[in-house]
């Protein structure tokens, strides 16, 4: 039944909507940036341009850790965005099927409203597909993997280290090319989701259930402003970017859950009421035949 699909779709958010503390992520990023800058400054101050192999390897290790940290942050952001998007898409389609199942039997023809729901659902799917960058992460992993194999094969030879640095740099550039969509996804997704939520809020009374306004939680995020501020602050502002990127989606989860909780409550109440009415009707018929 469509009602069961709605209930299951809402309750499955415990597995898909991962809330991560943005302050913790920002602290890890900020700590790495501070350590990396301090180490590089000390090496340059001590050795100048003539850096010994041991320090060259140390710089490469710092570089490697930085790339790995960036990859981890992007993986967390993209993965939870995709999981949430997939769950929410399934829930919207369950709500549409519920409306279709109740059409006409609810005492009114809501075919035009259902058509608008489908259009709003398609718009959210289109926005999410254009902003989610999950599949592109594989392209970023290929140069990293090849660079690691080169370094492992020839140890600390100077040429191998530079090949390693170059390939990791290519991976970093690919991740940076994905960064605008990661930065903008929460806002664009929320704006499209609000459109569907408003359409469903108008349909809900015909279905005998209730729905609260979705609400808006975030404003415009300029990735290029973040890039400029990161460059001006020697990389320290990237911690603020990580904080906002994780906090924005956390806020969206909170508002989305409040919206879903009202639907869950009202659908359950309606199904219980319908079941009770059916039991009462059956009891009356049994009494008539007794």
Image (tube, rainbow, N blue to C red):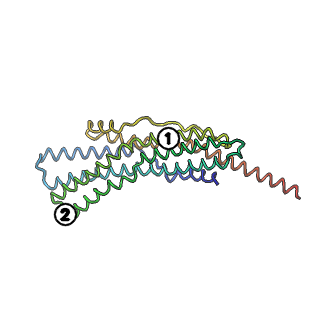
Q: Residue furthest bottom?
A: 153
Q: Taking 42 as reference, is 286 left or right?
A: right
Q: Which mark is residue 181?
A: none
Residue 118 x/y as whole percent: 56, 45
Q: Residue furthest left?
A: 50
Q: Taking 15 as reference, is 31 left or right?
A: left
Q: Using the image as rendered, state which of residue 152 and residue 42 is in the foreground.
A: 152
Q: Quadrant of the C terminus?
A: bottom right
| Residue placed under numbered mark 2 in the picture | 154
Q: Label 2's element?
A: helix
Tell me which residue sits at (64%, 55%) in the image. Answer: 1
Q: Using the image as rendered, state which of residue 221 and residue 181 is in the foreground.
A: 181
Of pointers 1 and 2, the one earlier in the residue sequence: 2
Residue 177 x/y as whole percent: 32, 46
Q: Using the image as rendered, state which of residue 276 and residue 168 is in the foreground.
A: 168
Q: Using the image as rendered, state which of residue 140 and residue 215 is in the foreground.
A: 140
Label 2: few (<14), some (14–19) or many (≥20) C-alpha neighbours in 10 Å = few
In whole angstroms, how far apart are the C-alphas of marks 1 and 2? 51 Å
Height in image: 198 above or below 169? above
Q: Taking 225 as reference, is 110 left or right?
A: right
Tell me which residue sits at (36%, 53%) in the image. Answer: 137
Residue 58 x/y as whole percent: 20, 53
Label 1: few (<14), some (14–19) or many (≥20) C-alpha neighbours in 10 Å = some
Tell me which residue sits at (72%, 49%) in the image. Answer: 274
Q: Taking 288 as reference, is 44 left or right?
A: left
Q: Nearer the viewer, mark 1 or mark 2?
A: 1
Residue 217 x/y as whole percent: 48, 37
Q: Are marks 1 and 2 in contact (CB under 8 Å)?
A: no
Q: How many marks?
A: 2
Q: Label 1's element?
A: helix
Q: Which mark is residue 192?
A: 1
């Amino acid at each position: 039944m469509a009602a069961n699909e709605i209930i299951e779709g809402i309750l499955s958010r415990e597995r898909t909507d991962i809330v991560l503390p943005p302050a913790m992520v920002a602290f890890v990023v900020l700590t790495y940036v501070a350590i990396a800058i301090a180490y590089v400054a000390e090496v340059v101050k001590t050795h100048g341009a003539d850096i010994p192999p041991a320090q060259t390897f140390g710089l490469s290790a710092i570089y490697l850790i930085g790339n790995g940290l960036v990859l981890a942050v992007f993986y967390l952001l993209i993965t939870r965005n995709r999981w949430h998007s997939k769950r929410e898409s399934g829930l919207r389609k369950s709500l549409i099927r519920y409306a279709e199942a109740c059409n006409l039997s609810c005492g009114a023809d809501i075919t035009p409203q259902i058509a608008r729901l489908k259009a709003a659902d398609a718009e959210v799917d289109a926005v999410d597909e254009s902003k989610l960058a999950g599949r592109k992460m594989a392209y970023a992993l290929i140069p990293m993997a090849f660079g690691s194999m080169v370094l492992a094969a020839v140890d600390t030879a100077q040429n191998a280290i530079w090949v390693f640095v170059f390939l990791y740099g290519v991976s970093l550039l690919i991740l940076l090319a994905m960064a605008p969509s990661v930065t903008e996804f929460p806002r664009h997704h929320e704006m499209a989701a609000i459109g569907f939520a408003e359409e469903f809020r108008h349909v809900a009374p015909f279905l005998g259930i209730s729905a609260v306004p979705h609400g808006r939680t975030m404003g415009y995020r300029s990735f290029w402003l973040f890039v400029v501020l990161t460059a001006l602050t020697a990389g320290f502002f990237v911690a603020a970017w990580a904080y906002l990127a994780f906090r924005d989606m956390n806020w969206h989860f909170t508002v989305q859950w409040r919206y879903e909780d009202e639907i869950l409550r009202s659908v359950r109440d309606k199904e219980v009421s319908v079941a009770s009415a059916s039991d009462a009707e059956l009891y009356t018929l049994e009494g008539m035949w007794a």
